Image: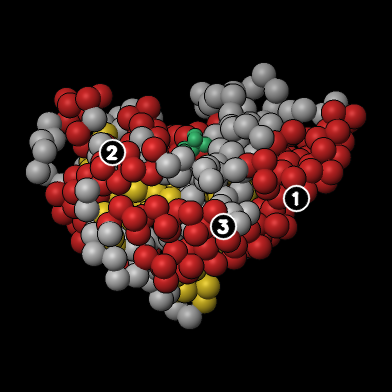
Amino acid sequence: MSVPLLDLQAQYATISSELDDAVAGVVRSQRFILGPAVEKFEREAASYLGVRHAIGCASGTDALLLPLRALQLEPGDEVIVPAFTFFATAGAVWNAGLRPVFADIDPVTFNMRAQDVERALTPRSRALIVVHLFGQVAEMEPILELAERHGLAVIEDAAQAFGARRRVSGEWCHAGRLGTVGSFSFFPSKNLGAFGDGGLMTTEDDALADRLRKLRVHGGIQMYHHEMVGTNSRLDALQAAVLSVKLPHLDGWAEGRRRNAAWYDAQLAGIPGIRRPVALAESHHVYNQYTLRVEGRDELKRHLDERGIGNAIYYPLPLHLQECFAGLGYRRGDLPESESAATEVISLPIYPELSPGQLQEVAGALRAFYA
Ligand SMILES: Cc1ncc(COP(=O)(O)O)c(C=O)c1O
């Protein structure tokens, strides 16, 4: 039996009539740009996340780029980012005319820690982007404390963590509610996925929200009057309608992912050569990915590929070693945890609709490899 890494048709099958009606409703209304569907989803997302402002935009990449521009930093100012993340985290910094400075990660959670940020600080540091990688919120309290001490803005890259939570001072807080700005992606493979690209920015800061709302429509709310140079980066109304249908199902889907993760955890326990993902006690992990660290990673990947077991390497080359950033002067060995994670990680199918038979197939293939 082959097992796909992700099966979006399985999710669609469970709510297809609701989704089809929502799309048809937008088509009937012929209101495609911003308008009621986008406003409705923004209200629902703000209420779900417990934030004052939730502002749709065209992608998770723009949900990083627009806040970086809204912070009104100077060209060449430095933004600290983890080296082990999806490219957009650093690409957005570069495209905002700022300088990415790479920090290493915790080998257990794959997230950047305060001590990693501290090592990357310079007098030109102005902001940091903390990524909640694979669906687990980073250890935010010491990062926020450090940022406060050094006057740094904090962007949470929560692209993989819609619905993830962390207990802060006894209160469970959603990802995207803890920093200066939260950034989300609705790329179809995310836990809350659209039927195409989409993104969302969250903040408690009214002035920042005002700038973000302007930046997504060419820099002015009043048509043909531009206070700043913005761009076209709106959340599509069709996507917003799809997201409004999916949002009430999100926590249930996350529970399915958590159940599958617990099942794998039990099945893979004690296999030498496999280190399972670690969910911290203060964290409600939503497993956008279930990512192992393994010995013989590339051979294991071939073994799974040959058996039709979906898998993926997120990410094979850390960002400080990417060709496009060669001019920044990093060398292999500079960020050892990011570099060794890149050679050892492999992600398995974790979507909530996986059948018991499919889960058995995946775990059986891993056991056979390490037998
Ligand atoms: C950590 C991270 N940041 C940013 C992005 C960018 O999101 P998008 O693909 O919607 O532009 C993604 C998604 O792929 C991501 O995983």
- For badge 1, the amino acid type reads Thr
- For badge 3, the amino acid type reads Gly
Among numbered discs 2 and 3, the one appearing first in the sequence: 2
The secondary element bearing badge 1 is classed as: helix
Q: CA distance from mark 2 to mark 3?
A: 29 Å
The secondary element bearing badge 3 is classed as: helix
Q: How is the image coloured?
A: secondary structure
Dot in front, 2 or 3? 3
- For badge 2, the amino acid type reads Pro
Q: Residue at x 42, y 71 (%)?
A: 266
Which labelled disc corresponds to residue 316? 2
Among numbered discs 2 and 1, the one appearing first in the sequence: 1
Q: CA distance from mark 2 to mark 1?
A: 34 Å
Q: Quadrant of the C terminus?
A: bottom left
Q: Which residue is mark 3?
A: 357
Dot in front, 1 or 3? 3
Dot in front, 2 or 1? 1
Q: Position of residue 171 (x, y in %)?
A: 52, 76
Dividing the picture into quadrants, the one containing residue 8 is top right
Q: Which residue is mark 1?
A: 14
Q: Position of residue 208 (x, y in %)?
A: 52, 45
Q: Is residue 218 above or below residue 121?
A: above
Q: Residue at x 34, y 55 (%)?
A: 368
Q: Residue at x 67, y 46 (%)?
A: 10
Which labelled disc corresponds to residue 235? none
For the residue pair 362 and 169, the one nearer the viewer reads as 362
Viewer can see residue 79 = no
The secondary element bearing badge 2 is classed as: loop
Q: Position of residue 248 (x, y in %)?
A: 72, 57
